[in-house]
Amino acid sequence: MRVTDAAIGDPRTAPVVRDALAQRLGAAAPFLMEQSPADPDPAYLLDALVDAVRRGPSAQRVWLLFVAVTGRFPTSDDAAEAIRRVELESTTDITLWLLDVALESRHNVVIPVHPMRVVTDTVLADIDHTARYELHTGIQQVVRRTVPIWVRDHDVVPVAWSQGYQALRALTPAEWRRVENFTDAVGSAADPDPADDPVELVVPWNCTIALFEVSPPGTPDRLAALAQYSGSELVVVGHDCIPVVSGDLVPLSDHFPHFLSAVKYARRIAGVSVSATAEFRGFADTLATQGLPAPQVNECQLATEPLPAGRSAGASGPRALPLVLSVGSFEPRKNGLAVLHCAERLWRDGLRFELRFIGGSGWGTRFPAELAALQAKGRAVSAQQGVDEATLAQAYRTARFTVFASLHEGYGLPAAESLAAGTPVLTSNFGSTLETAQPGGAVTVDPRDDDAITEAMRRLLTDDALIDRLRAEIARRPVRTWADYARELWATLIEPDGR
């Protein structure tokens, strides 16, 4: 059939859409036809590719054909319908349906003007959120410490998602700088949507897609279809299952269960701690009830390397008051209200110290109001947001001890960072934080017991011998670098035999 400008919509943009379609069809042709056609006209290419797939159907070939025509990855329903149509319908009917789907995509979400590149037998690292935003909490730190090492040492393509979260795309130079050379203060700013330009789609063929983050809304069903139909595989860095295990401690959202709908088709999962690994193994064990093979789930502990010191405006000489530091977002799960309450008890008992919180804004908490009330009383308490790594590293080194009394963590980087900086930590006596504490340098308590937190803080503020003993234990702790983690993560997720 003829692909005219009128057939693909608005005459002002039709030539651009037509040229992009021709490019994508040409990129797919070597994988769908024994011999690429000499005629680059999209009408001829489209008919030839549909006919070739119809005569030699497979889920993988249908998946790639769908992407080439529509400029987006199919959902599970899209892929299933496309496979059924290829099995039963004529070349013309299949072509018309694919163009209808492409035009629907155009009017509802995005004009499919992106060129595409098919990559084969390589690893794609999905790092959308870290590439787009300047947030630098635990997951983003894992991405920024690990993915550049993978890119340096292996054949790895870092990717994000196109406008409307329709398909994987190459990173912009600014996005890759945000991953590879992130040193600025953290915030929430992002680049203008790069999909305003015809960014290049990256389409996997017999590849592995490594999910380093919880994938963006709208993408899990496309990832699930990719794992089921495209011939490529998913592997996952398993940070935690907190949104389903401790739903009372996080904002109400149905996104994480949707993310798990893609994870259930993964081949391997690498938990960042023993606790996170147990959570994902529990999830994997449920998949037999759906007739699905369970992903291979193994532990791959994060690094314990100290933050780079750099230069910091926060550097100072001897302190008038001992500093107690608490790092983490100001949300209920981090238990900041309990730390404020216990600190006030100690101030009322006459102890003199400074309490400083460093983190990001939280949800559903009275923390800002309680903090302001203590400040109004003249208490030595403050909160900082958006600090750079050098300032954070200086705060860790300056503190007498840190408090990380979280109620549920997948790993809990602030506790590990404190210990790596040589500073004792008061942390929770279960889960991943207990794992971090066990090699020494930490005092553990039940984070739900205000009396226990108060008395542990009192001891750490008044007992110099305890501080000295904890610092000596820290000096004997083994050091695990980010290079160690990156190497082991690659072996766990990518190497043929895994771990």
Image (spheres, rainbow, N blue to C red):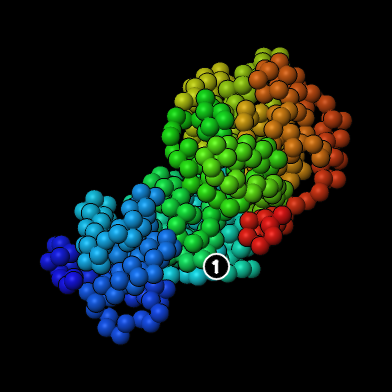
- Residue 125's x, y, as percent? 53, 59
Label 1 Cα neighbours within 10 Å, binned few <14 / some 14-19 / many ≥20: some
The percent coordinates of residue 430 (x first, y second) are: 71, 29
User: In the visual, does 445 lie left or right of 16?
Assistant: right
- Residue drawn at x 61%, y 68% is 154
Please indicate, yes or no, whether residue 156 appears anywhere in the rendered image: yes
In the image, is 192 to the left or to the right of 6?
right
Q: Can you tell which quarter of the image residue 416 is in?
A: top right
Query: Of all residues shown, which one is farthest toward the bottom?
Result: 38
Vertically, is 431 above or below 61?
A: above
How far from the left and from the top, in percent, is residue 15?
Answer: 19, 71
Which residue does the image show at 74% across and 37% down from the upper left? Answer: 435
Of residue 443 and residue 401, the one placed in the foreground of this image is: 443
Closest to the observer, 56 or 259: 56
Question: Residue type at mark 1?
Answer: Thr
Residue that carries the numbered disc 1 in the rendered image: 122
Residue 185 pos. (x, y %): 52, 49
Residue 244 in the figure: left or right of residue 466: left
Identified at 49% across, 22% down, the residue is 366
Q: Secondary structure at mark 1?
A: loop
The count of marks equals 1
Image quadrant holding the C terminus, namely bottom right
Q: Quarter holding the N terminus?
A: bottom left
Above or below, 220 against 155 in this view is above
Residue 27 visible in this rendered orientation of the protein: no
Choose top left, top right, bottom left or bottom right for residue 173. Answer: bottom left
Residue at screen point 54% across, 42% down:
291
Question: Outermost residue toward the front?
Answer: 88
Question: In the image, is residue 7 above or below residue 272?
Answer: below
